[in-house]
Image: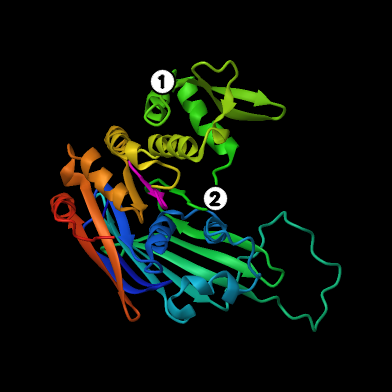
């Protein structure tokens, strides 16, 4: 579980320290103070094995494409687009402190192709210029300086990207990201739910979803053509219906509990938790989410704009107050700071009608 974070030179964060996170951490603040960026930088810290680690974050923001050049691909990650300064992310998780550094390398030399690759040219022109390659060098180290991973996110002159891992130590925490602007593909939901089907545990998910849809009787996997989907059966309705057609709240809760259960010992990052959920059901939802997080030893870090959501969290999580934190981000000129409130402080603010969002 993440308990402490330090960030330098990432997007809007010149320097930010958050000394105390809980199993359930909510992030609030005005527009454009970095709430989603905070989720992104933390997820990026764990997302170490994908060549599209940066591109898919753009996709979650609704960006459909970026130019295949370093300034467009990686520039937005750096504070003030200054790629001469490195990004530093320090995270204390499960008691261990680890640091990741992201550096732009304009002169990356890719490794030579392995024997058995494409045959060499019959003739090599004497005036041929070697192709230039760029890299975002990523280095993970422990508190004592021991290297855990060294990798290179590459971009060549043809616009091809890749991930070259030079060194990697086994281990690492699991993480999942649920974006606010992009629906999760049905096939991904089905794959996660299928694990519950194999173990005969579908009722666990049904009981969770009945919080917002009491008519739900069961969930099942239905194959239509080459694809499979999660369907729900409602009381009084003969046919099942694809879960993504039963409302944004149903889809959101299903994917949340599935990702919590499949990220044991790790962290789920959720942008704008209140979207698609009516405030009247939020206390029960928070109580169920808290139980699921404890059951699967998982952490949830989420953003919110909603006072009702924050108030409901206090009500629904009253049995686990020591595991709740609320972080308000504030901007003064170009500096962003984090004010951390525990359960008691949030509850007192709500009782006295003090604005916290």
For the question of whether residue 19 can be seen, the reply is no
What's the residue at 57%, 34% (across, down)? 245
CA–CA distance in space, label 2 to label 1: 27 Å
Which sits in the foreground, 58 or 145?
58
Q: Work out whether 15 lies above or below 242.
A: below
Q: Which residue is mark 2?
A: 182
Quarter residue 259 falls in: top left
Q: Which residues are magenta?
A: 265-273
Q: Secondary structure at mark 1?
A: helix
Q: Estimate the x, y position of residue 238 in percent, counting from the top left.
A: 58, 15
Quarter residue 134 falls in: bottom right
Which sits in the foreground, 116 or 218?
218
Q: How many marks?
A: 2
Q: Which mark is residue 203?
A: 1
Q: Estimate the x, y position of residue 296 in percent, counting from the top left.
A: 32, 34
Pointer 1 local density, CA inside 10 Å: few below 14, some 14–19, many at least 20: some
Image quadrant holding the C terminus, namely bottom left
């Amino acid at each position: 579980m993440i308990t402490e974070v330090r960030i330098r030179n990432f997007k809007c964060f010149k320097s930010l320290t958050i000394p105390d996170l809980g199993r359930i951490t909510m992030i609030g603040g005005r527009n454009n103070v970095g709430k989603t960026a905070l989720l992104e930088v933390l997820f990026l810290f764990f997302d170490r094995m994908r060549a599209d680690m940066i591109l898919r974050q753009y996709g979650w923001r609704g960006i459909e494409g970026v130019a295949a050049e370093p300034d467009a691909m990686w520039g937005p990650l750096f504070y003030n687009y200054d790629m001469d300064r490195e990004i530093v992310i320090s995270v204390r998780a499960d008691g261990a402190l680890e640091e990741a550094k992201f550096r732009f390398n304009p002169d990356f030399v890719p490794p030579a192709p392995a024997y058995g690759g494409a045959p060499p040219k019959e003739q090599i022109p004497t005036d041929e210029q070697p192709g230039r390659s760029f890299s975002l060098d990523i280095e993970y180290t422990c508190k004592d300086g021991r290297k855990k991973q060294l990798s290179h996110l590459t971009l060549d002159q043809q616009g091809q990207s890749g991930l070259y891992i030079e060194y990697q130590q086994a281990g690492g925490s699991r993480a999942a990201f649920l974006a606010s602007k992009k629906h999760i593909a049905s096939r991904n939901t089905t794959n996660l739910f299928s694990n519950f089907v194999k173990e005969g545990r579908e009722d666990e998910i049904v009981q969770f979803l009945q919080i917002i849809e009491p008519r739900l009787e069961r969930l099942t996997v239905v194959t239509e053509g080459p694809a499979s989907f999660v369907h729900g059966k409602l009381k009084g309705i003969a046919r099942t219906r694809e879960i993504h057609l039963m409302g944004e709240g149903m889809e959101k809760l299903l994917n949340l509990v599935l990702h919590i259960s499949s990220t044991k010992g790790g962290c789920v990052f959720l942008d704008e938790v209140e979207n698609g959920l009516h405030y009247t059901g939020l206390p029960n939802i928070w109580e169920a989410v808290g139980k699921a997080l404890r059951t699967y030893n998982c952490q949830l870090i989420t953003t919110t704009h909603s006072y009702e959501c924050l108030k409901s969290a206090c009500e629904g999580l009253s049995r686990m107050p020591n595991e709740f934190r609320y972080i308000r981000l504030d901007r003064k000129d170009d500096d962003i700071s984090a004010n951390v409130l525990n359960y008691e402080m949030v509850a007192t603010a709500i009782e006295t009608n003090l604005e916290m969002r």
